[in-house]
Image (spheres, rainbow, N blue to C red):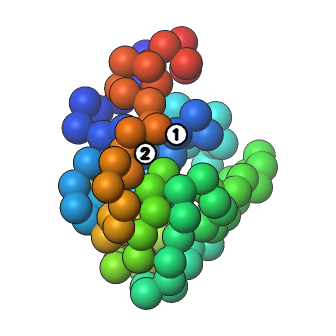
Amino acid sequence: MFEVPEDRKYLESHEYATTDDVATVGITDFAQDELGDVVYVELPDEGDEVSQGDEFGVVESIKAVSDLYAPVSGTVVEINEDLFDHPEYVNDDPYGDGWMLKIEVTEEGAFDGLLSPEEYRDQTE
């Protein structure tokens, strides 16, 4: 059983966002397990605008290269630069040290179209 924290919402493509004014974004425990050992992460720059559902970066593992999609729209206010030297954090702690971006949420109802923890769990079982 994969960890699915209750304090965030999820995309079907396995990205998560905390439901704060500045949302923390990353990939789920399920996604990192499917990818295998992450060896490289490409992220946008601070100050970049991202739109919900659009690609914001790439994660590369020993098995595959996968696009990353923004769960919410807004401005990137911080990126996890530790991932450039330690991409394994995505595998070790996807909801903690392995976070990827912080996005200042700009749209009312930004989280409405995302999956609840229960809906995401149902999708990955």
Q: CA distance from mark 2 to mark 1?
A: 6 Å
**Residue drawn 52% across and 39% down?**
11
* Quarter placement of the C terminus: top right
Amino acid type, mark 2: Tyr
Q: Position of residue 121 (x, y in %)?
A: 44, 19
Q: Position of residue 42 (x, y in %)?
A: 61, 72
In this orientation, does residue 38 appear? no
Left or right position of 18 against 42: left
Task: Identify which residue, 72 or 106, lies in the foreground.
Answer: 106
Q: Which amino acid does the dot numbered 1 rest on? A: Leu
Q: Which residue is mark 2?
A: 16
| Residue 30 appears in the rendering | yes
Residue 18 in the figure: left or right of residue 63? left
Q: Report the residue that reaches farthest toward the front.
A: 108
x and y, in percent, of residue 60 in the image: 69, 59
Q: Callout 2: few (<14), some (14-19), or many (20+) C-alpha neighbours within 10 Å?
A: many
Question: Are there few (<14), some (14-19), or many (20+) residues within 10 Å of tag 1?
Answer: many
Q: Residue at x 46, y 38 (%)?
A: 113
